[in-house]
Image (cartoon, grey):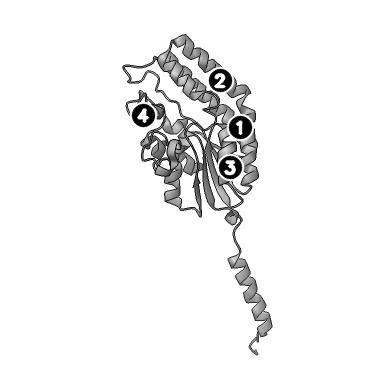
Amino acid sequence: MRPIRVVPAVLSVVLLSLVTLLGAPSAGATGSGYAALGDSYSAGVGAGSYLSDSGGCKRSTKAYPYLWNSAHAPSSFAFVACSGATTGDVLDDQLSALNSATGLVSISVGGNDAGFTDVMTTCVLHSESACLSVIADARSYADHQLPPRLDRVYAAIRDRAPNARVVVLGYPHLYRIEGSCLFGIGDTRRAAINGAADELDSVMAKRAADAGFTFADVRGAFTNHEICSGSSWIHSTTWPIDESYHPNASGQAYGYLPTFSAAA
């Protein structure tokens, strides 16, 4: 049998086709940057080690976004979460971190809209009836006024980062009921505060799902590590006062980070 001779022009076409196929970018390569948006729970307030250029936003090198970035080295990292941020603040101040090259977005927002600071201040410093009343107001807000605000934020994220996977992170229960705390508020108030977190998480999960985003529920990760658990990953009343009722470094590393990593 005579050997087969490959015409040089044909060989060139074959090789070019192989190079094209092997070198073609995957579908997931359309966006590989990571942007971390949201409020104090995403900024890492309470974890310490704050970035000097973050000012009052108090972005921490021990926050889950910073830890995830260090472990995965995305092509870019925009860490713009800020203490006290509401949905309006995200729309006004944080969306510029997003673009078509953003492949992953994390966000926690909604607690400040619903009056997180007012709830905790009232429940710690005032009567039980005042506490339950302000919680009822917060739950009503979460049910009726927060959903369209979240919808606007989520729509804006999708518009600015059309190729991104978006992970919406919820809030943990703050208290272990019938826990080991000898002082502070009683279990009736603790249970009501936890119930408000459940309400808020439920609303966030529904709005995230309707937007095509992933909701990452941290409540399971924080179980047995709430205030009064004896192994708390959340500050009780502390100084600086703005770090009160926020995850500490362990809460960020062992509560938020693995929950986010599993969803990212």
What is the three-letter code of the residue carrying label 3? Leu
Q: Nearer the viewer, mark 2 or mark 3?
A: 3
- Residue at horizontal 35%, vertical 20%? 179
What is the three-letter code of the residue carrying label 2? Arg
Query: Tags 2 and 3 in contact by the CB under 8 Å rule?
Result: no
Q: Where is mark 3, residue-wise?
A: 95
Q: Where is mark 2, residue-wise?
A: 139
Residue 5's image quarter? bottom right
Q: Where is mark 1, residue-wise?
A: 150
Element class at badge 2: helix
Q: Where is mark 4, residue-wise?
A: 240
Residue 145's image quarter? top right
Sequence-first disc among 4 and 1: 1
- Residue at horizontal 67%, vertical 77%? 13
Query: Tags 1 and 2 in contact by the CB under 8 Å rule?
Result: no
Sequence-first disc among 3 and 1: 3
Q: CA distance from mark 1 to mark 2?
A: 15 Å
